Image: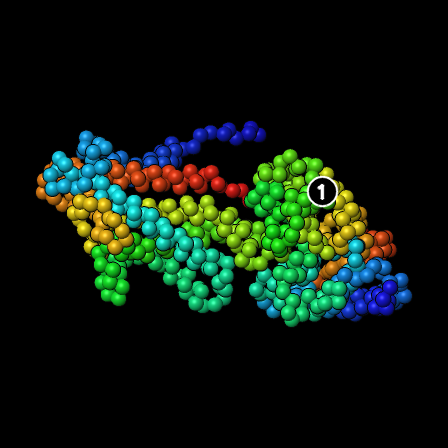
């Protein structure tokens, strides 16, 4: 008996395989190409207007003199405030859920579910909340920096909590057992082992959460960030604007020059965003642990 | 020796044996009863009628044995017999599992570890534990050892405390020039000795070892075994091991646990025999012990 010869796959079958692969690549291309086209358009419009003067000048009604100093400073203030507000609260909530909450109790499960859902709530809803409770209503801060920061904090808090929980959960139980077996109390175990070990993960997650907040426009518009602010906020209760607001403002102006300025501002915002994301990725890779 | 020593063999052997349905029961009872008191050491633990359940399903039950001071006591038995469950009772690690309940009593120098007013944190300061897989903290070698003394607020020169612990764990010469390095740079065997050093640093009285060599190669294992023999002059050691040769090499006393199959898949571990290690391995009373140590079952 002669052994069967090993031949090739039927041509039709091979064609089908190639077609499938092509289809997948096409899907990838759609997403990628859109981004590239967008970037090129923005860059070609904006690069010409990007200069140190543009970054350091205040907004103006004259396109030739307008810059983004106050929105940029506003955005930086917002980010710092949001970080200061959300990281302690988010990490605290995450530690409670991971280390203390008894999952057999219904309210702990309810809180968990709630946080997951909150992360998916549209940002405009947080804007309405901020307007009703922080700007007006019981707290009545007015249209100030603090109100904006608090609104954005509410928006990203669930994301920070979820990221922090994941970082905390990735610390293996053996570390906890090791600490407790040495006579550490639960608090010492968390404070000296679990928390330090999860700091890189928490930092990465928090930065990614902040980079979501940095681009948020809707809630800020709703709570009434002022669209034309030719000065930097001098305190928490001062009026403010932010980059996305300024971009929104400029794109809605009739003059074509402002649209080009908007493109330049988008480039600055993108650079800020990419820097933050790159830092988060660097942080994650640097402290990546194999347990 | 206190009189309670004399009653010890009966206490430890009777309850599990009486539960066994098969005939050798009587033979074992008599032989155990007239035997010399096992382990002529002052008991550090007196385990009485201890049972552990998870969500109400018993995992081990009816454990009664005395564990001698400055002895190495091995707990051996096939998988699922509850050795690890049992050893975790001695430092109240089972408290961390909300579903686990422990009944019976474990007297430590006469005080019930599960009595009211006994804080598990205080228990663990005196009764250290080394785990199956080396679990160094993701910190420097120095900080790994110093962690325990720091959290329990030990006074004195921390450098000296760390050096003493590492020396006792036979690791000092390996690491003295690299104390600031991350503990994860060490080999598996060194990591496990670091975990032992970490445990020694808080000056415990007892060291519990839950299969301390199961993740190590034979050379690293031999080092840990040598270390254990050295440490028993100063500490009492309880070791859970899968490795019967290891139990035979290092331990003074051996307790053999066997799963007792109940309805369905439920197995409940209990002690079938507890005696000097030599006896367990050369002339066991119990047929299941003999089958197990000769490798016919388990």
Where residue B188 appears, x then y in whole percent?
64, 41
Q: Is residue A25 left or right of residue B251?
A: left
Judged from this view, the residue extending furthest toward the left is: A254
Say left or right for A222 vs B27: left
- Viewer-side residue, B68 vs A224: A224
Q: Is residue A36 left or right of residue A96?
A: left
Decide which of A210, B16 is in the foreground and name it.
A210
Question: Which quadrant: the C terminus of chain A?
Answer: top right
Query: Residue drawn at (50%, 48%), measured in percent from left and top?
Result: A196
- Residue ID for mark 1: B167
Q: Is residue A159 above or below residue B32?
A: above
Q: Position of residue B255 (x, y in %)?
A: 77, 58
Residue appearing at x 26%, y 66% in the figure: A138
Looking at this rendering, what residue extends furthest in the bottom direction? B116
Relative placement, left or right, of B1 versus A178 is right
Please say if A134 is above or below A1: below
Chain at numbered mark 1: B
Q: Position of residue A26 (x, y in %)?
A: 30, 37
Residue A109 makes an appearance in the image: yes
Check the image and tell me how it is coloured. rainbow
Horizontal and vertical percent position of residue B20 = 77, 67
User: Looking at the picture, does residue B42 appear above or below residue A76?
Assistant: below
Q: Residue at x 83, y 56 (%)?
A: B276
* Number of numbered labels in the structure image: 1
Residue B74 visible in rendering: no
Residue drawn at x 48%, y 63% is A101
Image quadrant occupied by the N terminus of chain A = top right
């Amino acid at each position: 008996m002669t052994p069967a010869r090993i031949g090739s796959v039927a041509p039709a079958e091979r064609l089908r395989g190639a077609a499938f692969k092509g289809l997948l690549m096409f899907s990838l291309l759609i997403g990628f190409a859109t981004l590239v086209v967008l970037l090129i358009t923005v860059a070609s419009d904006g690069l010409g207007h990007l200069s140190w003067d543009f970054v350091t000048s205040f907004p103006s009604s004259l396109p030739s003199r307008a810059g983004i100093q106050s929105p940029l400073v506003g955005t930086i203030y917002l980010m710092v405030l949001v970080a200061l507000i959300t990281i302690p609260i988010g990490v605290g909530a995450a530690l409670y859920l991971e280390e203390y909450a008894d999952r057999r109790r219904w309210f702990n499960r309810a809180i968990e579910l709630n946080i997951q859902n909150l992360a998916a709530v549209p940002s405009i809803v947080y804007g309405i909340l901020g307007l009703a409770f922080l700007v007006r209503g019981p707290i009545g801060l007015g249209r100030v920096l603090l109100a904006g920061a608090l609104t954005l904090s509410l928006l990203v808090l669930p994301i920070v909590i979820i990221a922090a929980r994941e970082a905390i959960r990735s610390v293996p139980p053996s570390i906890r057992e090791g600490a407790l077996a040495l006579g550490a109390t639960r608090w010492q175990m968390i404070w000296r082992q679990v928390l330090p070990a999860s700091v890189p993960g928490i930092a990465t997650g928090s930065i990614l959460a902040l980079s979501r907040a940095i681009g948020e426009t809707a809630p800020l518009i709703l709570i009434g960030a002022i669209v034309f602010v030719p000065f930097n906020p001098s305190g928490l209760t001062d009026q403010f604007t932010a980059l996305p607001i300024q971009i929104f403002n400029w794109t809605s102006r009739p003059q074509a020059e402002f649209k080009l300025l908007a493109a330049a501002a988008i480039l600055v915002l993108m650079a800020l965003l990419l820097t933050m994301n790159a830092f988060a990725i660097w942080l994650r890779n640097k402290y990546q642990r194999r347990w | 020796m206190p009189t309670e020593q004399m009653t010890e063999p009966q206490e430890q052997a009777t309850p599990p044996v009486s539960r066994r349905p098969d005939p050798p029961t009587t033979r074992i009872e008599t032989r155990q009863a007239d035997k010399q008191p096992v382990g002529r050491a002052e008991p550090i633990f007196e385990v009485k009628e201890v049972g552990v359940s998870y969500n109400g399903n018993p995992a081990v039950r009816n454990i009664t044995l005395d564990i001698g001071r400055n002895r190495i006591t091995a707990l051996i038995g096939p998988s699922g017999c509850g050795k690890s469950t049992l050893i975790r009772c001695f430092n109240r690690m089972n408290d961390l599992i909300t579903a686990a309940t422990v009944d019976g009593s474990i007297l430590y120098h006469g005080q019930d570890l599960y009595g009211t007013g006994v804080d598990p944190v205080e228990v663990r300061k005196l009764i250290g534990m080394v785990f199956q897989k080396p679990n160094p903290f993701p910190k420097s070698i120095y900080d790994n050892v110093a962690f325990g003394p720091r959290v329990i607020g030990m006074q004195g020169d921390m450098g000296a405390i760390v050096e003493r612990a590492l020396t006792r764990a036979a690791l000092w010469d390996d690491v003295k020039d690299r104390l600031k390095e991350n503990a994860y740079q060490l080999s598996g065997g060194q990591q496990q000795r670091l975990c032992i050093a970490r445990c020694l640093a808080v000056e415990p009285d007892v060291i519990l070892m839950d299969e301390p060599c199961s993740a190590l190669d034979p050379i690293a294992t031999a080092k840990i075994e040598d270390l254990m023999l050295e440490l028993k002059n100063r500490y009492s050691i309880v070791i859970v091991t899968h490795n019967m040769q290891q139990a035979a090499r290092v331990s003074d006393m051996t307790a053999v646990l066997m799963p007792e199959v109940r309805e369905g898949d439920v197995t409940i571990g209990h002690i079938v025999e507890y005696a000097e290690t030599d006896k367990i391995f050369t002339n066991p009373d119990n047929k299941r012990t003999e089958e197990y140590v000769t490798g016919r079952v388990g």
